[in-house]
Image (cartoon, rainbow, N blue to C red):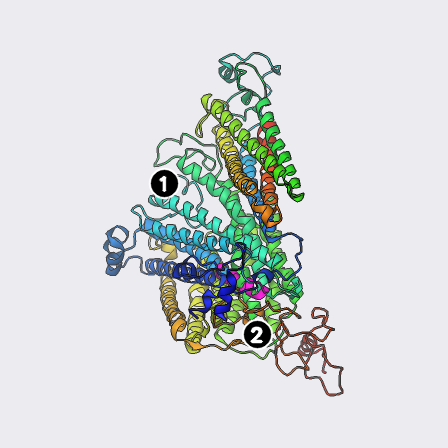
Amino acid sequence: MSTDTSATVTETKTWSGGRSPFNVSYGKLMMWIFLLSDAFTFSSLLIGYGAVRFSYPAPEALVEKIAPMSHLSDDFIEQMQEIGAFSEKHWPSPELVFNHFPFLHGVHLPLMFVSLMTFILIFSSVTMVLAVEAGHRMDKKKVGIYMFYTILGGLAFLGCQAWEWTQFITEGATLEHNPFGPAHFAALFFMVTGFHGFHVFSGVVFNIMIYVNARRGMYEKRGHYEMVEKVGLYWHFVDLVWVFVFTFFYLI
Amino acid sequence: MSQSATANTHEHGHDDHGHHKESFITKYVFSQDHKMISKQFLITGIVMGCFGMLMSILFRLQLAWPDSSFQILETLLGSKWAPGGKLDASFYMGLVTIHGTIMVFFVLTAGLSGTFSNLLIPLQCGSRDMASPFMNMLSYWFFFASSVVLTYSVFIESGPAAAGWTVYPPLSALPKSMPGSGLGMTLWLVSMILFIGSALLGGINYITTVLNMRTKGMSMNRMPLTIWAFFFTAILGLLSFPVLLGGSLLLVFDRSFGTSFYLSDIFLNGEGALANSGGSPILFQHLFWFLGHPEVYIIILPALGITSEIIAVNARKPIFGYTAMVISIIGIAFLSFIVWGHHMFITGMNPLLGLVFMIFTLIIAVPSAVKTFNYLATLWRGNIQFTPGMLFAIGLVSFFISGGLTGIFLGNAAIDIQLHDTYFVVAHFHLVMGCAAIFGMMAGIYHWYPRLYGRTMNKTLGYMHFWLTFITAYMVFFPMHFMGLAGVPRRYYQFTVLPEFGIWENVNVLITFAAIIGALAQLLFLYNFFSSIFYGRKSAQNPWKSNTLEWTSPIEERLHGNWPGAIPTVHRWPYDYSKPGYDDDFIPQTVPDDGNLDELAHSHTQPAEPPSDEPKNVVHFSTLLARWMGLSKA
């Protein structure tokens, strides 16, 4: 017994005797299953968000539409509070909260910055698809290039998020209090975008690992670029989740 | 053999799983072999189970003799938790909470499905190991860390979490609301988040292994029912635990970072509202029970799967209604996601919504009853071998019936409003998910002990263990139904100040005596379990004459890779017991068929040879039923 446990079996390669119902490797299947599970985590947060948000009345149409690109005075928040557009009683209109853009201080640009972030993230998904496709062609050089762009996109998104959080916090938003509306507004914002940002961050870390491996020729030696596909799945999922976060948090 | 095998390992690349010389650390501690991981889960589960059981004895003492003092308690627990030998009220709440948490999550989730999914999925599906042995190892160590954190939380100064195992806010969300809501609650949440990590890693592995790693010939409809049960258990865990993760994260933020997702206007110690409010404690209940309800099926499904297998093997008959069993597992799994509201009937839920939840809840009785009747029909006229494992499996059926019937009471919104949070609920879930699942687990342990350790457990001790446990379990939980119907609320520290409950004092004493005897009976099991590892009788290769693949892998030498040669090929379903026309009363799955095998279309009564003129000695169940009902005299 003591010796036999160390003796593992020679034919380990033949262990997948059965027909694979989804015709995918076990690794890819595991990633899909993980994503399904993760989708439930995000759902719970977004449904919790919905439950809290819709317990408040809808934002009142107190302000006539402020034209985009119009001038924002320094006491914009106070003005909004005065006319009641920002109050504890109802959920604020995201257009009035997220209307800043780096280097364009004092210009009303509703949701422009978050649209840019969304564009960056979706574009990084495009480069990820190109990396996967290059992997199918066993094109080591192209895989490296597109993975690099994907990592850049991820980092850019994280940078944008850092800027947005900074802006939001500078204006006085904390987990306990914010000048725009009910405390839940900022708390849920930090919670949901933070949880998503954590996923993007992990994704960037995975992408860097896979990028380094691909550049070192590990997958070429292995004969397939399935690892790129797997992180690709994760990356697309994170992107898809952002689409929901964007819709529910910013657009509605 | 070992020489050539080790020599061969050097030729493999890094892709291979577990091809290395194993030290003590890699073999027993950070093992990647699913069989060792299964033992790790089992023993951790048993240790945690002992903790949980001791806690129940402590608070049962308090309930039976609320005004007496036991000097030993002060000696053991110190003067803070048992001043003058009488249990402190906050500590009582802490004990109830940790007892529930340990039993539900650590014993009956990780200890049960962690043990048997790990052991049986690769062995019964015919694969070398789990899809990812490394993640499998991580799954155990996450669980271990989680157990350590939870156990540690019992010993901190402010006491363990005391908001009940469901940790409803605001009790759990306000650190100042009671001693146990401080550090103890934080540790509870940390422990739970680690546990969710473990469940996720394990679940991904189980599902992938079942879907992708079955051996040749092992089609889905030839899988043993154990595997079906573990498969859907893993799916349930995978889809419900993340929701608890979301809910717990929000709770952590409420507790520690000043948010108020779950906090509405609250006055604490009679002074001032909180800085933040406007949240809803009901939101937590929704998120919790979206996990919480599937969780009870995560507990019971593996036990039912184990029972299916053990009953079929020991009745020497094919399982009755294999397809119906599979469909009912799927039905239970699906329905379990849309019934969580029946835990919340008294939250002020819209009656229409309550009605919907009620209807779905009552529909679960259908697949559950299908399973019960199929067990009974399998036992019917079987050549029953009363092994300890079989007794425990039959015990499960008994508890599943008696506990399941009260589920129909509680599923009705109108009755539930009366019975909510009474001892009726305690009786119900202890019978149907506590006792039934523990009996399923015990059945599994006795049955697969030879597979785990190559030896058998002592039979006589097994019988004593079964009868003592079976009788005392009913003695503990059956009287609780009547207490609950009379309105005795659960989680109360003592009833002496409520005169209308004074009549139950003797009953409480009876229950406590039964609980103590039941706990002592577990000592028999512990002795039997641990001494048999070293001194048990050596088991035969296939001690129960079973068809499934785990008995084709050598039980003496525990190979990492399960089969020394090629993986066996499967030719038939696992329930060919007492098939007419064969010498043996079992035909292992590896035996080639005669070319015209369609096990699901034909019942076991289909003769393999051309029918002869001799009278049939096998009778259809339907014929028996008709005869029994007086419809047929044949």
Q: Residue B360, percent across and down? A: 62, 52
In this picture, is B492 found above or below A99? below
Q: Which range is magenta?
A: B114-127
Q: Which amino acid does label 1 sit on?
A: Ser
Pointer 2 chain: B
Does residue B197 lie above or below A200 as drawn? below
Seen from the viewer's position, the closer of residues B36 and B7 is B7
Residue B426's x, y, as percent?
A: 46, 57
At numbered mark 2, what does the secondary structure look like: helix, strand or loop? Answer: loop
Give yes or no for residue B398 being in the magenta stretch. Answer: no
Question: Callout 1: helix, strand or loop?
Answer: loop
- Magenta segment includes B116: yes
Q: Do the residues labelled 2 and 1 touch (CB within 8 Å)?
A: no
| Residue at (52, 44) in percent of width and height | B287
Chain for disc number 1:
B
Q: In this view, does A243 lie above or below B165?
A: above
Q: Mark 1 points at which residue?
A: B177
Q: In this view, does A218 lie to the left or right of B146?
A: right
Residue A138 picture location, percent across and down:
65, 44
Which residue lies at the image location 42% right of the left edge and 55% below the top edge? Answer: B102
Could you tell me the amino acid type at mark 2? Answer: Ser
Q: Give the distance between the C-alpha atoms of the residues marked 2 and 1, in whole angstroms.
A: 56 Å
Magenta part, dominant SS: helix
**Of B472 and B258, the residue lying toward us:** B258
Q: Say which mark, if any, is on residue B546.
A: 2
| The C terminus of chain B lies in quadrant | bottom right
Q: At 73% from the left edge and 73% from the top edge, which residue is drawn?
A: B595
